[in-house]
């Protein structure tokens, strides 16, 4: 019997999420997102831009955590334009990078109106193949090819593009609904046609301009699996991402697990652990400075709230009357303790006594005063870097990996 195809998650919060207008994450915050995604059993984090100079130390420092077996088994992948030059720069700045996604536009609209005669349909394929060959030559272990604007690309051309990618060693094709114009019906048909013809795993990258992002993502993934190949859904924590956002990480997982017709018939990567949902969603909200909507699936304040007589009575009699899944599954239900009396915080101008108090509460002990002063100095930098009070996990991270933290805070323009 052949192996059943699966649905994997590739989270792009640290790429599409941070390139979004008006919102950003510090390099420490990006690192924490990678750590939480790993704890959640997510297959891959698109962790940044290897050709962008201010990312270099952050990317290398995170790959050092991989080498020390602290950020495994998650795969950390970089996003690049599909050009030989970008691939060369990436390997020069981030030599230990193993996973890449190379991106180029495939629609008539973008080939004509973005490349403006610089590239035509055949040279787009040629450019992509040359970048792919270069990446393979420089030692990439796994590489996805992004067809930007795939949803507006002619399907015959998309198939030709994907066949060339497969022939030259690509591991996946990323079908990008860059403008969010697909519907669950069109994406199913197009991805099915593409996957049937090329027989290569398909990544589904959708945007929410029509409010269809989660439906489109699972429909595209289903089409790939129906064609007998694995699918990879691109997500962002709290549905961040360009314009109206990408597919929300938690909603996608809930949909695969609980939607009629998907449950039992389609197989989510079994390592995914929803218990981290509450934590990662709250952290991303704090880090981005964007509140979680009250009606957000799974993690919104109202996701398990009942008030009307019939609903409250029903939910109290048996939760399944009005709740599709359990809040405990998402890591909710524990009371959160908020200090209402004296509170010492660690900031950019903290001294050693207050700092010791903060770390005592985290039950972290330093071997001597020298070590404590060294970590205190890094915590001050971290506060300058984040420009908001550090959370406990960030404080613990700095104490545990002071040398990595130092690299993350260092930028050399
Ligand atoms: Zn995007």
Image (cartoon, grey):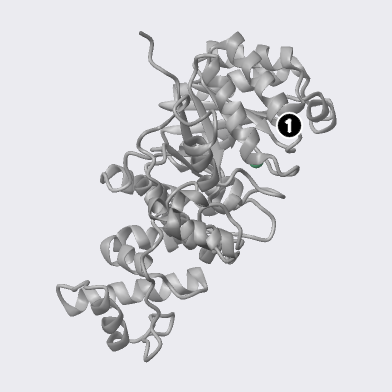
Label 1 lies in ligand 1 vicinity (Cβ under 8 Å): no
Label count reads: 1
- According to the picture, the residue beneath numbered tag 1 turns out to be 182
Q: Residue at x 38, y 56 (%)?
A: 331
Above or below, comparing residue 383 to residue 298 in the picture? below
Instruction: Locate residue 258, reporting x and y percent.
Output: 49, 38
Where 254 sits versus 410, above or below?
A: above
Is 174 left, or right, of 8 in this rendering?
Answer: right
**Up-down: is 152 above or below 44?**
above
User: Which residue corresponds to the image point at 33% horizontal and 65% vertical from the top-left?
Assistant: 398
In the rendered image, the quadrant that contains the C terminus is bottom right
Residue 31's spot in the image, x, y percent?
42, 55
Rendered residue at 54%/34% (across/down) = 233
Q: Does residue 83 appear anywhere in the picture?
A: no
Around disc 1, counting alpha carbons within 10 Å, would you say few (fewer than 14), some (14 to 19), or many (20 or more)?
A: many
Q: Between 271 and 46, which is closer to the camera in this rendering?
A: 271
Tell me where residue 19 appears, x and y as whole percent.
Answer: 63, 50
Nearer the observer, 185 or 196: 185
Can residue 37 be seen from the camera position used here? Answer: yes
- Name which residue lies at 23% across and 79% down: 360
Q: Quadrant of the N terminus?
A: top left
Quadrant assignment, res 300 = bottom right
Does residue 226 appear to the left or right of 99 in the view shown?
right
Image: 295 above or below 229: below
Q: Quadrant holding ligand 1?
A: top right
> What element does badge 1 sit on?
loop
Q: Residue 194: percent from the left, percent from the top?
A: 63, 15
The furthest residue to the bottom: 342
């Amino acid at each position: 019997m052949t192996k059943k195809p699966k649905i994997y998650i590739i989270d792009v919060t640290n790429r599409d999420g941070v390139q979004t207008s008006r919102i950003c994450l510090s390099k420490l915050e990006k690192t924490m997102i990678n750590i939480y995604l790993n704890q959640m059993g997510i297959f891959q984090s698109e962790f940044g831009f290897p050709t962008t100079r201010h990312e270099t130390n952050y990317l290398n420092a995170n790959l050092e955590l991989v080498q020390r077996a602290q950020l495994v088994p998650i795969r950390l992948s970089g996003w690049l334009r599909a050009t030989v030059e970008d691939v060369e720069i990436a390997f020069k700045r981030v030599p230990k990078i193993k996973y890449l996604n190379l991106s180029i536009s495939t629609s008539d609209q973008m080939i004509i109106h973005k490349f403006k005669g610089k590239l035509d349909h055949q040279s787009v394929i040629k450019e992509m193949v040359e970048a792919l060959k270069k990446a393979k030559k420089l030692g990439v272990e796994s590489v996805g090819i992004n067809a930007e604007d795939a949803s507006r690309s002619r399907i015959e051309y998309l198939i030709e593009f994907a066949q060339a990618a497969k022939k030259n060693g690509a591991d996946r094709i990323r079908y990008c609904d860059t403008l969010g114009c697909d519907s669950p019906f069109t994406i199913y048909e197009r991805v099915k046609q593409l996957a049937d013809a090329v027989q290569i795993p398909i990544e589904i990258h959708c945007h929410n301009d029509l409010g269809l992002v989660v439906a489109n993502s699972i429909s595209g993934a289903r089409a790939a699996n129906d064609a007998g190949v694995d699918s990879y859904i691109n997500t962002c924590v709290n549905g961040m991402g360009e314009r109206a956002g990408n597919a929300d990480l938690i909603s996608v997982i809930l949909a695969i697990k609980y939607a009629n017709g998907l449950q039992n018939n389609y197989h989510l990567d079994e390592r995914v652990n929803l218990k981290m949902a509450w934590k990662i969603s709250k952290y991303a909200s704090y880090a981005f400075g964007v509140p979680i909507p009250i009606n957000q699936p799974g993690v919104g304040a109202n996701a398990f709230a009942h008030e009307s007589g019939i609903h409250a009575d029903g939910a109290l009699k048996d939760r399944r009357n009005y709740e599709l899944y359990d809040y405990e599954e998402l890591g909710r239900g524990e009371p959160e303790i908020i200090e209402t009396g004296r509170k010492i915080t660690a900031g950019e101008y903290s001294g050693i006594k207050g700092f010791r108090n903060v770390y005592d509460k985290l039950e972290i002990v330093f071997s001597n005063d020298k070590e404590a002063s060294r970590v205190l100095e890094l915590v001050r930098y971290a506060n300058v870097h984040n420009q908001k009070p550090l959370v406990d996990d960030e404080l613990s991270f700095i104490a545990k990996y002071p040398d990595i933290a130092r690299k993350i805070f260092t930028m050399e323009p």
